[in-house]
Image: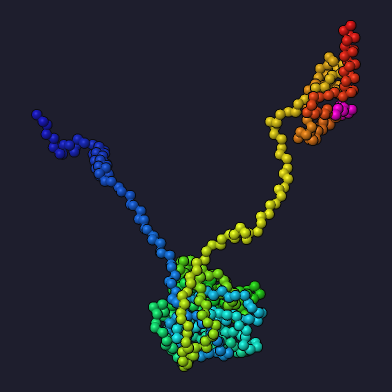
Amino acid sequence: MPIETTKKERTVNTPARHRGLSGGWVLAGLGAALLSACVVVPPQPVVERVVPAPAYVPPPPAPVVSVYVDAPLYQPAPIAVQWAPPPMLVEVPPPRPYPYAVWTGGYWTWHGQWVWCAGRWLAPPRENYAWVQPYYEHRGEVVVFVPGYWSAPGVTFVAPPIGMHIDVVEPTVAVSASWSRPWGPPGVFVPPPPGSRPGIIVPAPIGTPPAVVVSAPPVVNVGMHVQNTTVINNVTNVTNITNVTNVTNVTVIAPPNAMANGRAYAAAVPAAPHLAAAMPALVHAAAPIPVTTAAVPAFAAHQEPVALPPAQPVRLQALAPPHPAPASMQPPMVVQPSRPQAPEPVAETMPRPREVERPAPREYEGMSPAQRNAEGHPHPQGGEAVPQEGHPQAAAPRREPPPSEAAAHPAQKRPAPAREDNAEHKPSAEQREEGKRAESEHREGER
């Protein structure tokens, strides 16, 4: 018959410490069950795939009209153009034909459209006349342009003042899709490097030759600018305001976000136009050579347009790595005579030279090698190795005996080594006589 036990009795019969332990075991069992039922999954790392931006490919340049321009002998009136000049072209100047020749041209000028004013060496039209670089300024929504010209001595360039009335010229040809509005901060500028995105302008000081950006990488955003760098008494002064006069170098700077390759750029470039144009270009967009040597007059706002030659395609030339010259053009190879090398040390495993046996005199018979050495006599058979002639050890210096041994045997002398040839050894005359005497004495002793 089962015994009924009430809840109260179970509580009374169970000690307090056991009640606490039993409750703890229950909680621990429940926790273990919960932990065994739950699977902890560590968070997976989030991998973001970075897709590299496609390499910038310069747009194919549109055909270009290339002409020579007959520059005036005074500062022309400014004009306003609604489109920015295209990126620069590459035109490497030939050698200077005479000392006083001046490199002119090599920039974009306006003739109803942006045309290439081809560069050439010219003599100043009058004594002490100076060449003035073209002027580009981003003002409002237009480009204020003054073409290059010859300036009289002592006459400096005057920038068009703000508020001056400037005629806005209209194009004489259909607006092309390659034309772009000026894109960049207001102020004086030069066109962007070859292969750049059309419309971008590069701020620069007044009088900066446009050719200073020819060797720079292409840009796809605004940010590139040109600044003067003048070194006076080892102090570098940087300015963007003064004109480029008596300055040997300028610095072209651009942040990474402005460059097509995404890397910051900074380089010192010669301020002389012919030196800047001769620097190697990363995008070699070669300027077309004019089809005629006849020069056209500079553009004027209220004159009839002049007839222009047809446009020519622009050649894009990639810079290939340098190749070795043909074998017929390479200088002959000069073989330098080898220097004599020091003799290598003789290894310890080299076989010892063959010992020469010498006939022993009769008075040495019956004496041990130790007794002979004590009396100062050399060992007649195998006591000392005689080096062979021509052996490396033959020329080696002999070891000097220690001071104690030298004092004990002051009169000790070593005989000269016997000569050894490839033939059989032949005793000397003295050795033969000594041998005969020893043999005769030996026979008499036997008798």
Of residues 119 and 211, the one drawn nearer to the viewer in this rendering: 119
Does 409 lie within the magenta span? yes
Q: Is residue 224 visible?
A: no
| 24, above or below 167, in the image | above
Percent coordinates x, y for residue 167 in the rendering: 45, 91
Task: Give the side of residue 238 with respect to residue 42, left or right.
Answer: right
Residue found 42% across the figure and 86% down from its top: 172
- Please report the bounds of the magenta region as a residue range: 407-416
Identify the main secondary structure in magenta.
loop
Residue found 60% across the figure and 83% down from its top: 122
Percent coordinates x, y for residue 62 in the rendering: 43, 76
Q: Is residue 371 visible?
A: yes
Residue found 71% across the figure and 39% down from its top: 344
Quarter in which the N terminus is drawn? top left
Task: Give the side of residue 78 with respect to residue 347, left or right.
Answer: left
Does 62 lie within the magenta span? no
Percent coordinates x, y for residue 175 in the rendering: 39, 82
Tell me how the rendering is colored.
Answer: rainbow
Residue lying at the far top of the rendered structure: 447
Task: Give the side of residue 352 with respect to residue 225, left or right.
Answer: right
